[in-house]
Image (tube, rainbow, N blue to C red):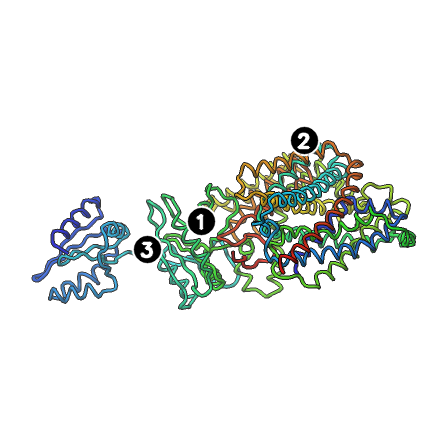
Amino acid sequence: MATNQVQSIKDSLKNKIWPAEDVVFKEFHTKEKYIEALYIKTISDETIIQDKLLKPFFEILSPDLFLDYLQSSPLVIPFESEQKTLDEVIKGTAILFYQNAIYLFDSKVDRNNSVLDTTVETTIQGPQSGFSESLPTNLGLIRKRYPQTSLNVESTTVGTVSKTDVMILHDTRRADTDTLTRIKQFLASIDVHMFQTGEQLLDIIKKSNRALVPVMLVTERPDRVAVNLAAGKIIILVSGSPFAVVLPTVMKDFMSSMEDIYQTYWVTKFLQILRYIGFLTSLVLPGIYVAVTSYNPELFRVQLALSIAGSRMSVPYPSFIEVLLMLFMMEMLTEASIRLPKAIGPTATTVGGLILGQAATEAGLVSNIMIIITSSVAISNFVIPINAFSFTLRIMKYFVLALGTLFGLVGVVLGFFILIAYMVKLDSFGEPFLTLIQSKPRKE
Amino acid sequence: MNRYYFYLVLLNMLINVIIFVPKILIDYRYEGAVMGILMAIPIGITLNYFYSKAITKFPEQGLPEILANSKHRWLKMIHFGSIQIIWFSAGLITLVGFIDILSRFVNPEMPKLSLLAIYLAAIFLIIQLPTERVMYFLEIVLFLNIPLIGFIIFKAFTNEYLSWDSMLEVGTHLFERPSLKSIAAATYCFSGYANLIIFNRVIKGKLKIWNFIVIFFIGVLNLFTTFFIPIGFHGSDGAQEYLYPWISTADSLRLTYSPIERVIFLFLMFYMSITLMSVSVHWHVAFELLKGTFKEKVSMKKNWLVLAFFGGCSIVGVIFLNSLILHKLTIYWMMFRLGFEIILVGSFFFWARRRAA
């Protein structure tokens, strides 16, 4: 490269990078040679620069030998273009100007690389640690659990402002190539300013950016990722997020916990059935209550119908208002206990659960049976192992409730099946989201 | 055993309760219904066999794809048009009949049109799905409902008030000359195969002989249950008093220990989804054929036009058809359908043979 060309690139780089407090541009001299380095010290690891760059620079006296050292160091990447160089600098790479050539010296600092405990998808047995917030560490965790040479890792960036590093992992022998190309196209087509975590993809996948049911699984467990890799799924890792995205995802994945592998067969089957029953209960119970009390009290046997009616005796308004009131309080309680600091978290549950529930019935605002229904809806809602899906379920029950209020029993049954039909309609990168017998889609 | 084919036939067998088949059969119980049922079984199986054989020569193709580059455009339009009318009216009768049942037994105070509105909303969502998705949904619905219907049938057969003598009495009228109406009604149970016109898209490979043997046994059991259980419950003379014999039968059943004591509610809840599915499957066929009639891709606007037409027809149907007129209409529709089906199967079988040769 000609001297003036290097000089002009150097000048334009210096112009483009704002001389902020942490931008370092420094020259180092020995008798025989000199080198210039440009980096941002807050995101560069200065010990790497010290050990791998400055020490050899002062120890190797001959300029040619030091050039050889630079060119053969695994940390050094040759210069490609000005734009790429700029992109690298703001991620922590140091730029070196030495003997009319430009080198990129990888000195990125790897922060937040401590492995976190699982907090969202906890299991009783099995591995207990999740991902960290550092991309290389996460990749290392997966590689350690999935020691296969066929594991392929590709890298790209997403986000026009955030320029977040994103890695796509798949097992070349097992993953479907069509799905892989679809996912790559999808990632390339994303137009978003700030990309912080994989969960953002849940909405971006829809053209309207408004999704109800998630069609990708976001997990914090390396063991789940490894199991899914072996099943031919494709994993997306996002820099700075302790969650990995698993694609394509079907409803069965949302209903499975990692514990299913760590338990005995019949226990697993029992737990799975329990989850589906929980799903059903949480979805239709409020709707059924309204339909039965307001439209068809004769549905239940007479003793039960009477005890429901008796319990509602002091309630001064129609059943759907009662249900809405209680569900509303319950949602508030759930939200509050997420937002509250851990230390006062139990207070919310005590105040809400015990005092509010007890007082509301005694004041005759809601019936006793309604309290039971609300709490069973809330409990069964959180039986769903994957959080994103359990939140979806929280919304879906209002749809069934609305139809149940308007149309009675017919509304509840049809509302349930409309939701099922909607989920059957969805697909996740070519794989149908909900089928009874989950099999690979037909090749078209 | 191809499960998708089985589902289609099974769906029609289940829905016959709504579309007046038991009523028609019980009306003719002394005038040849028994013989009619016995004759309907071979007729139904034969039609099943020939049509499935013919259409599985074109694996994973529906009729629009098979006839995509046919030169006789007018012939194709008439062909498609007539099938559409039959399929659409099948769905319409089921829908109007069931709305009537709902307003009679579940929501007597609610206007029928608002019951129709929610049904149409669900149906329109389903018929616009791709064919394989409709099939997946049908599978889920049947999976959720089959245990329930099995339980109800088990309860019916083991009920102590079931009078086997009444059934035997009707059985002695075996050698009456069968009436065409009863044959037509009984063959409806087997005519689920005709949905293969579109649903052949999801069927891979040839259908084995096992399919037809299973359908034979299920069909016999189904017709026996449909016809004889209401007679057993209400007596050989009493059974004709009811417009919907099966629903009254379900109302005579009682679950002693269950929180839901009256079986009629279980039964109706089960039929809410089965009706939804049956209408959706029939209308999906009509809808897809309509789309296949046009060469170019159907625009959103045209799509909505068709759906608006479907919706309009059902609104008119619900307003103007009361259950008695609907019942009479269904009898003639059944006979027309049987004739049409025989012509359809015959012509398609020979056409397919010539085409394949």
Front residue of this view, candidates B345 and B243: B345
User: Which callout, 3 or 1, points to the residue nearer the camera?
Assistant: 1
Q: Is residue B131 left or right of residue A139?
A: right
Amino acid type, residue under disc 2 in the picture:
Pro
Front residue of this view, candidates A47 and B254: B254
| For residue B236, above or below residue B54 | above
Front residue of this view, candidates B54 and A403: B54
Q: Write down the quadrant of residue A134 in the picture.
A: bottom left
Q: Chain of mark 1?
A: A
Camera sees residue B96: yes
| For residue B172, above or below residue B19 | below
Q: Residues within 10 Å of mark 1 (few under 14, many from 20)?
A: many
Q: CA distance from mark 2 to mark 1?
A: 43 Å
Amino acid type, residue under disc 3 in the picture:
Arg
Q: Secondary structure at mark 3?
A: loop
Front residue of this view, candidates A2 and B203: B203
Q: Secondary structure at mark 1?
A: helix
**Tags 2 and 3 on a common chain:** yes
